[in-house]
Structure formats: structure tokens, C-alpha cells
Image (spheres, rainbow, N blue to C red):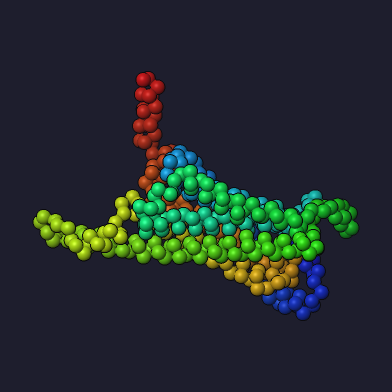
Amino acid sequence: MTDNPFHLWEGHNDNSSMLTLASGILSDEHYYIIFLFMIYASQIINNCSIIANSLSIAVFVKLGFSEPSNISLTALAVCDFTLAVLLTWSNLCFWMAYHNVQLPFHTTNVSYLTGGAHSAYLSSTVAWITAFISFERCLCILVPLKVRRLITPRGTFAAMLIIILLTFCPSFFIYVRYKFVWVFIPNLNRTILNTIPVNNDLAILFEKISIAICGVIQPLLAFSIVLICTVLLVIQLRKISSWRTSVTSTKSQRAQPEENPAASSSAAEARISQKEERLVRMIVAIATIFIVSYIPTCITLLCYVVFEEFNLFGVYRRLFIVSGYIISLGQPISGSVNILIYYKMASKFRTVFRRLVRLDREGQERQALHNVLVCNE
């Protein structure tokens, strides 16, 4: 394994004590075993995410975008789909590097600039879209009369564009810090495309600011918003459930139901339609899965900030790559599971989905008959 392309950037640090420590933390044998397992496990999850989000996008397109929630959920599905595609490209490159496949470019380093770096920023986009969905549902419950006039399809679409511009588009600034070069490899007697860091003060400062804001502060802040909003939604749902239980028990005890004063005061705060309650429960489920799957990302981001050598070209490069694959296992899981939540909790989504995959033949026959009648008119 000494000629493996993974070693191209390893050992380029003069701090021998740190190199010894890094090797002790993760030996060659453990590194490659973990690495190979992560590649296959990650790709299985990525394939599920690609299929699931493709179906979700198709269903939401058929449902239309008259509802603001359909717009935000479609944006979430598109980002999850794109994230899975980028991670698939990274997996393919690392798999080829592991098996020493000879290609005209350095697989691991080129994949970082074309896939890995962008997927890291895109995970921040997913976090902010989830935060927006959670925050919007939270406001709709807490102050419904004021928010419903503001949460419109056009406003939601604009919010999705702003989130993408502020979180994902800055990922292309990484080309200020790193650049593609053609490098001659003597032992291979060939020239390959590789990447090298641009070591000037301006590029380094630009990278630090960009990563600090877009790669660390933004995702951690989004994670905090999702966490807080989810807690508030759960508390409010419990209030709603308690109020409905008290009203039901009061009506069952009276032959002619009368308005309960205590219940009416709670109703002013807790009363929402059952349709709205189902939507809130669905958002809580999505946010909860996101929180669980995003915890490894938060830990990795904190390590990136605390430890200077924890990066692709540092002493702890192996740990950085392994932690990246742990993240790649967690994030696509959220995108894969979301479609199950939609199917379980959203009746319209379930109906359209069944027609789309040809599970609801009776519904398809009714739709076909309706189309024939419309054409005959």
C-alpha cells in the first residue's frame, strides 16, 4: 500500500512528533479497513437517497406549488438529491484511488475540489432549509394570524433562493485557495491533473473567513435553530393534545355540550386544524431525524476549528477523511428517510406517490376516465 495515491499529501509536515501521534491514532491497517467499509456503506445510503429524493421531487411537482410547504420541501429534496450525487462522485474517486486505478487526474485531491468541498457547503444548505421549515411551522402555531399573510409561495421561493445563494454558492470560492495543476509523476512517467494550495496571505485569509462563516458558523447556527424550533413545536403539540383530550372528555360527560371556560382559554393558544397539526408533526419528524444525523457534522466542524492540522492537507488528514465519511453516512440517511415520513403523514403525497409508482390502479382508472370525459367535452 505504500504506492497508494492516498499518501501523496501525507508526510508533508515537518512536525515528526505530531506525525507519530497521528499514526498511532489511526494505523494503516485500521485506516484502510475503515475507509473501505465507509465507501460501500456510504454508497448504499447514497443510492437510496438518490432514488427516494427523485421520487419525492416527482410527487411534489405533480402536487404543484400552490402551498408554501411544497416549495420548501421540494427545495430540501433537490438539495438532498444533489448532495447524494456529489457524495457518489467522491466515493467513486476514493474507490478508484484505493484500487490504484490509473487515471489522468489525482482522484482523491481532485474529488475534494469537485465533490467533497461542495458537499460540505451543500450540507449547510440542507441545514438552513430545514431550519426555515421548522421556524416557519413554529411561527404558524405561535402567531398564526400574523404569519399566514407573510408565508406565501412567492416569499417561500425567494427564501429558498436566498438560502442557496448564501450557503452553497460560496463553496466555489474554494478555487481561490486551491488550484488545478498538471504534475509530472516520475515513477509513472506520466502527467496527471492535481491540486495544490495557493500559499499567499490573501488566499489563506479568504479561506479562513469563508470556512469560518459558511462552513462552521452557518451550519452550527442552523442546527441550533432547528433544535430550538423542534423543542418548541413538541411543547406546543403536547398543549394541543392536552386541550383536545380535555375537550373530548368534557363533551362525553355532558348530554348537551357547553363551552368549557378553562378549555376555551387554552383553545385560544392551542387550537389549530387537524390538517395543520399533521403537517407540524411531519415537520417535527423531519427535524428530529435531521438533528440526529447532523450531530457528527457538528462534532467534525468543531474539531476543524479547534485542531489546526485537522484538514485534508494536515497531519490529521486520515481522521479528517474518516470523519467526512461518517458525515456522508449520516446526512443521506435523513434524505432517504424523509420520503417515508411524507408517505406516512401526508395523505395527498401518499395518493400521488401510489399513482406515480402504479400502486393505486383504481385511482389511475378514475383519472383515465376523467381525462376521457374531459376530452369528449
Residue 127 image-quadrant placement: bottom right
Q: Nearer the viewer, residue 263 or 302?
A: 263
| Quadrant including the N terminus | bottom right
| Quadrant including the C terminus | top left
Place of residue 261 in the rendered image (x, y in percent of width and height, measured from the top left)? 19, 62
Q: What's the residue at 74%, 69% (across, down)? A: 314
How many dots with numbers? 0
Q: Is residue 185 above or below residue 55?
A: below
Q: Can the viewer see residue 29? A: no
Q: Is residue 205 above or below residue 83?
A: below
Q: Is residue 194 left or right of residue 134?
A: right
Q: Can the viewer see residue 309? A: yes
Q: What's the residue at 62%, 60% (across, down)? A: 214
Place of residue 150 in the rendered image (x, y in percent of width and height, measured from the top left)? 43, 49
Residue with the most extreme left position: 255
Residue with the most extreme top position: 376
Q: Nearer the viewer, residue 121 or 13?
A: 121
Place of residue 38 in the rendered image (x, y in percent of width and height, measured from the top left)? 62, 62
Residue 18 image-quadrant placement: bottom right
Place of residue 330 in the rendered image (x, y in percent of width and height, measured from the top left)? 55, 61
Q: What's the residue at 51%, 45% (across, down)? A: 157
Q: Is residue 207 left or right of residue 198?
A: left
Q: Is residue 92 left or right of residue 53?
A: right
Q: What's the residue at 75%, 63% (across, down)? A: 204
Q: Is residue 323 left or right of residue 204?
A: left
